[in-house]
Amino acid sequence: MAKPAHQMKLGYFLFPTGHHVAAWRHPDASPCSAIDFKAFVHQIQSAERAKFDMGFLADNDAFAGGGGRTIEADLDALSRTSIRYTAQFEPITLLSALSAVSDHIGLVSTVSTTYNDPFNVARKFASLDCLSGGRAGWNVVTSSNFNAAQNFSMDHHPSHAERYRRADEFVDVVLGLWDSWDDDAFLHDKGSGRYFDPRKVRFLDHKGRYYSVRGPLNVPRSPQGRPVVIQAGTSEPAMEQAARTAEVVFTVQQTVEESRRFSRDLRARLPRFGRRQESLKIMPGVCCVVADSRAEAEDSYAVFEELIQPEVGLMMLNSTVGLDLSGYPLDMRLESLPDTDGHKGRQKLMLDMGIRENLTVAQLARRAAGTRGHWTVLGTTKDIADALEERFVEGEVDGFNVMAPLLPQGMDRFIETVIPELRRRGLFRTEYEGKTLRENLGLPWPDVHEPRLQAAE
């Protein structure tokens, strides 16, 4: 296997108690860590000492529902999950606090385009970017949880196609607002009495299908130009959106072949939008369990699997595929699934996994409860490093968003063992390359954004 000319980019997926849905029940878990700021401080500072590129937060706009089922119908199952699926800190508030206890690591969060306003999102992330010295990143999502609609004065959850049409315009508006100020707009000239150059401020004057936004944004340009745009979908509309505007893509593939196919497909789309290959980083999610032997790692993970309650596993599967499968026999093997307005890409991934591995509904539910469809690697330090290196090189990706079933213990072990091995192989940095998230990811300075949507579309 040929050695790459570049090094991996790594994200630390911040998560209270751990990424396994039953992590809070583990004997070593701290169930209250979701509302314990010190727990998040430990995670972000551990990640920064290890030189991770970013800490990443996911978010929900409502209780995590299951494939069109109401909160009431899933309330008993929800009561058996960790607080992550029902109540959690608002992410920008949390990341702003974490910016004060860190210096180099990127601070990234999911914020939905379906249940927010572009001016507010632009202002919040621009503020975080300035507060942190250029370390903010926005993970663009469209929300698949239909329960969120009633929290935002909407009668129904928009269709998948409608959500992506709305998201395209939303992202263009945010990018346009982030470009309200030229890089050298602020003069701070005490002698002339001119604080900024009025010729270097832009009014967006956007009038589109969904939004009418005048601007300019009342937050200055940040040390990295603007926050890094991240995206995490694999459906066709998501791929097009990523190729057009994303700078980092978090993705989910199970095999090297699937990874290579996804990467080549996405990168082949970039020239159509006038983008260079270096403007995009692909970072799939990976759940790692490190132990002294492969058998010990498997036994360690089996403890979590035994803690999954059946109703929780089924709820997580419903949520992942965007359908209510509660009427399906648990011993049934899925050959196909009806279309959904939820996560189309994630549904296909789970269905393909079930067919490839001949899994029953019950077995697939356990997979969904464990890692929500993410690639899982169990083994020794060498096993984990070998798997990451193979996927990095042969899967043609730029790095990984790393998660662990139990936090912080699982990631502490990864940092103590796997990170040194990756460095020994020349695959991961020993020091940060710069001060901003954009510099450390190796992304180019952002040009002034030129919206590509037709105003009357």
Image (tube, rainbow, N blue to C red):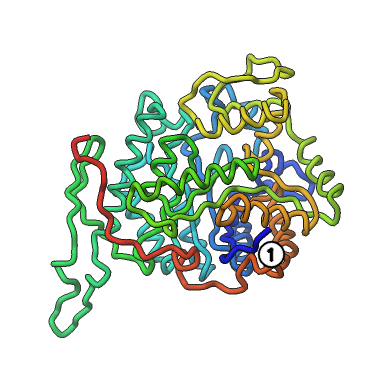
Name the spot of residue 408 as percent of width and height, x first.
69, 56
Name the spot of residue 437 as percent of width and height, x first.
47, 64
Q: Which residue is mark 1?
A: 422
Q: Residue at x 54, y 22 (%)?
A: 69
Name the spot of residue 318 as percent of width and height, x first.
59, 26
Which amino acid type corresponds to the residue marked 1 in the rendered image? Answer: Leu
Number of numbered discs present?
1
Q: Is residue 203 left or right of residue 333?
A: left
Q: Residue at x 69, y 64 (%)?
A: 422
Q: Residue 439 versus residue 3: which sits nearer the camera?
A: 3
Name the spot of residue 250 as percent of width and height, x first.
52, 48
* Vertical position of residue 184 compared to residue 154: above or below: below
User: Under tag 1, what secondary structure?
Assistant: helix
* Vertical position of residue 438 compared to residue 190: above or below: above
Within 10 Å of disc 1 (Cα), the crowding (few <14, some 14-19, many 20+) is many
Which residue is farthest front?
Answer: 2
Q: Residue 32 versus residue 94: which sits nearer the camera?
A: 94
Q: Is residue 99 left or right of residue 333?
A: left
Which residue is farthest bottom?
Answer: 191
Q: Residue 128 versus residue 11: which sits nearer the camera?
A: 11
Q: Residue at x 47, y 35 (%)?
A: 235
| Quadrant of the image occupied by residue 376 | top right
| Quadrant of the image occupied by residue 290 | bottom right
Q: Is residue 181 left or right of residue 150?
A: left
Q: Split into 4 quadrants, where in the image is the C terminus?
A: top left
* Vertical position of residue 88 compared to residue 424: above or below: above
Q: Residue at x 47, y 47 (%)?
A: 110
Q: Residue 365 versus residue 427: which sits nearer the camera?
A: 427
Q: Split into 4 quadrants, where in the image is the N terminus?
A: bottom right
